[in-house]
């Protein structure tokens, strides 16, 4: 019995040490990203692996641009569409989370996460696209790290540069050039709203640009944009 207890204690200690080491690693990278652009995120690596499974020479479209080089229209559109309380909250929209939990209970499975922009950034930088409460737990820890270490402008800058916007398309610059043939700085109100409307399911909307409901979503986002407060 004592041997079993010791073995279980050793397993628990090893797991705890691995967990702590992972958090130290994530926290160190968050500090690095305060001043440096990601060369590639965990989410990008996952998508690249999928692409290369069928096309070994595949590459991602990704080009980092500074916050000042991204249209204010896109900043407003993404906040309007994804996280209206972005400037106010400290990483979590508790009303949104409660609503997501209600939807999950109604469906009997994980269908919504109520994620803020900061939570989405945590996932994109460090985690996989799987939907599970374990991943959401790690996402929450990284979200606290991001909010504690970075200001809102930097969080939004990172987010707009690494978000997925199509099959192998990442970030505002690549998306603007992929869909409109212009730079991220030149995006108009409607173009920005279209990208924001695509964001929840970008690979689908890349193939189905005239999908039912997309135009309606664009109109809703355009109407909300003037009320959006930007981090400065």
Image: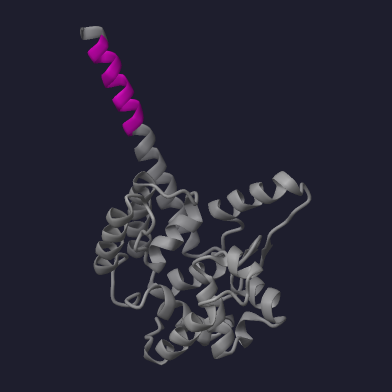
Residue 194's x, y, as percent? 56, 80
Residue 162's x, y, as percent? 55, 64
Seen as rendered, the residue at the extreme left is 1
Q: Residue at x 50, y 72 (%)?
A: 157
Q: Which quadrant holds the C terminus?
A: bottom left
Residue 147's x, y, as percent? 34, 64
Residue 111 against residue 71 in the figure, above or below: above
Residue 103's x, y, as percent? 31, 60
Q: Nearer the viewer, residue 57 or 64?
A: 57
Residue 29 against residue 203 in the figure, above or below: above
Q: Nearer the viewer, residue 230 or 48?
A: 48
Q: What is the span of residues highlighted in magenta in the rendered image?
A: 4-16
Q: Is residue 35 visible?
A: yes
Residue 227 is inside the magenta segment: no
On the image, which quarter does residue 19 sit in? top left
Q: Nearer the viewer, residue 107 or 69?
A: 107
Q: Residue at x 30, y 15 (%)?
A: 7
Image-based side of 32 in relation to 112, left or right: right
Residue 13 is inside the magenta segment: yes
Q: Nearer the viewer, residue 204 or 61?
A: 204
């Amino acid at each position: 019995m004592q041997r079993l207890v010791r073995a279980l204690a050793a397993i628990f200690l090893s797991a705890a040490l691995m967990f702590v080491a992972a958090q130290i690693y994530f926290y160190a990278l968050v500090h690095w990203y305060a001043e440096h652009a990601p060369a590639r995120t965990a989410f990008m690596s996952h998508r690249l692996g999928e692409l290369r499974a069928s096309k070994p020479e595949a590459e991602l479209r990704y080009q980092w641009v500074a916050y000042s080089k991204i249209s204010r229209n896109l900043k407003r559109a993404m906040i309007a569409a994804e996280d209206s309380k972005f400037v106010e909250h400290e990483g979590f929209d508790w009303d949104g989370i409660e609503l997501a939990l209600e939807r999950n209970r109604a469906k009997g499975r994980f269908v919504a996460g109520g994620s803020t922009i900061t939570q989405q950034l945590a996932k994109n930088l460090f985690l996989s696209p799987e939907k599970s409460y374990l991943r959401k737990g790690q996402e929450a820890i990284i979200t606290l790290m991001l909010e504690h270490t970075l200001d809102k402008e930097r969080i939004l800058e990172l987010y707009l540069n690494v978000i997925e916007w199509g099959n192998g398309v990442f970030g505002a610059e690549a998306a603007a050039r992929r869909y409109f043939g212009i730079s991220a700085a030149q995006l108009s109100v409607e173009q920005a709203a279209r990208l924001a409307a695509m964001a929840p399911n970008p690979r689908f909307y890349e193939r189905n640009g005239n999908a039912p409901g997309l135009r309606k979503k664009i109109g809703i986002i355009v109407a909300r944009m003037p009320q959006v407060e930007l981090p400065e």
